[in-house]
Amino acid sequence: MTARKLAAGNWKMNGLAADLVEAEALAKAFPSPKVDVLLCPPATLIAPMSAKVGGSAIAVGGQNCHAVESGAHTGDVSAAMLADAGASYVIVGHSERRTDHGETDASIRLKTQAAWSAGLVAIVCIGETLGQREDGETLDVVGGQLAGSLPDDCTAANTVVAYEPVWAIGTGKVPTLDQIAEVHVFLRAKLEDRFGAEGAGIPLLYGGSVKPSNADEIFGVSNVDGALVGGASLKAADFGGIIGALERAE
Ligand SMILES: O=C[C@H](O)COP(=O)(O)O
């Protein structure tokens, strides 16, 4: 099975209603993209963004969900609520949430299952810190995160894995192509070992300072099936450049 290609934008804690023009512009620029395209705005914009891009090829996703469907969890949002607002994906276990909110592999595994229960595709994030890379622990760290964060029922349809070196996020620093290749080959082998043919089809995204100017070379790396993009997904012109690069890599 070959993994489908996905360009995913994570707006993080950025975006007001006025910024939905960027999503509209993207939908107009890519009426029928050759790859899957996703925008994950803050929770407040999921419903209005879904309304704006409804009927287009742009999917909308959340940036996090709670592990249970409803209840006394003030300030949290469930996967069912995201789906109800128009989301079809949710990012889980982003390093910013692992750091800011103490999320663990175990809690991310539960969130992934919650996402599936609501009919959402889970984008599970993993990645090493700079210290871990410098200590030669990268493969041990991402292998452990992958094993611990993914439930047993992963399929090519319900799961995406995003490799995001923490030190490359928002810094302008990008691993070498060889470093990206080493991790992606390793992750693909782990996915195939555990999930067989389904593991071969789970999209493996790279994330960390992806821009239109470096997207072509990153998408040329074996086993890179797309990108999880932060800053460069906020403007349609920038994200469009990245989508175009992924289309060329098809
Ligand atoms: O979720 C996206 C990543 O954290 C990458 O962010 P960035 O593209 O701003 O480096």
Image (spheres, helix red, strand yellow):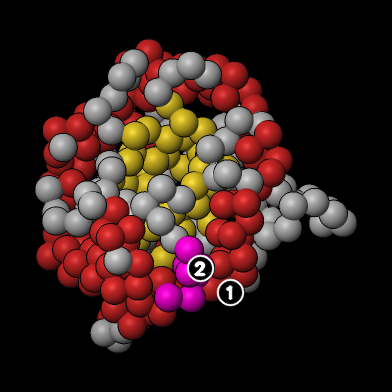
Residue drawn where x is 29% and y is 78% of the image:
139
Image quarter where the C terminus lies is top left
Decide whether residue 95 is among the magenta residues. no
The answer to whether residue 23 is left or right of residue 46 is left
Task: Give the x, y percent position of residue 156.
Answer: 36, 52
Can you name the residue that lies furthest to the top here?
A: 28
Tell which circle, 2 or 1, labels the residue nearer the N-terminal end.
Answer: 1
Query: Given the image, on which type of amino acid does mark 1 rest?
Result: Ala
Q: Residues within 10 Å of mark 2 (few under 14, many from 20)?
A: some
Can you name the residue that lies furthest to the front here?
A: 197
Name the residue nearer the viewer: 36 or 64. Answer: 36
Quadrant of res 8:
top left
Q: Residues within 10 Å of mark 1 (few under 14, many from 20)?
A: some
Quadrant of res 138:
bottom left
Task: Give the x, y percent position of residue 68.
Answer: 73, 58
Q: Is residue 194 above or below residue 221?
A: below
* Element type where label 1 sits in the image: helix
Labels in figure, total:
2
Q: Is residue 215 above or below residue 34?
A: below
The answer to whether residue 49 is left or right of residue 128 is right
Residue receiving disc 2: 151
* Spatial CA span between label 2 and label 1: 9 Å
Query: Given the image, on which type of amino acid does mark 2 rest?
Result: Pro
Residue receiving disc 1: 106
Task: Give the x, y percent position of residue 98.
Answer: 55, 67
* Element type where label 2 sits in the image: loop
Magenta extent: 147-153
Residue drawn where x is 48% and y is 69% of the image:
152
Decide whether residue 152 is among the magenta residues. yes
- The answer to whether the residue labelled 2 contacts the one labelled 1, judged by CB atoms less than 8 Å apart, is no
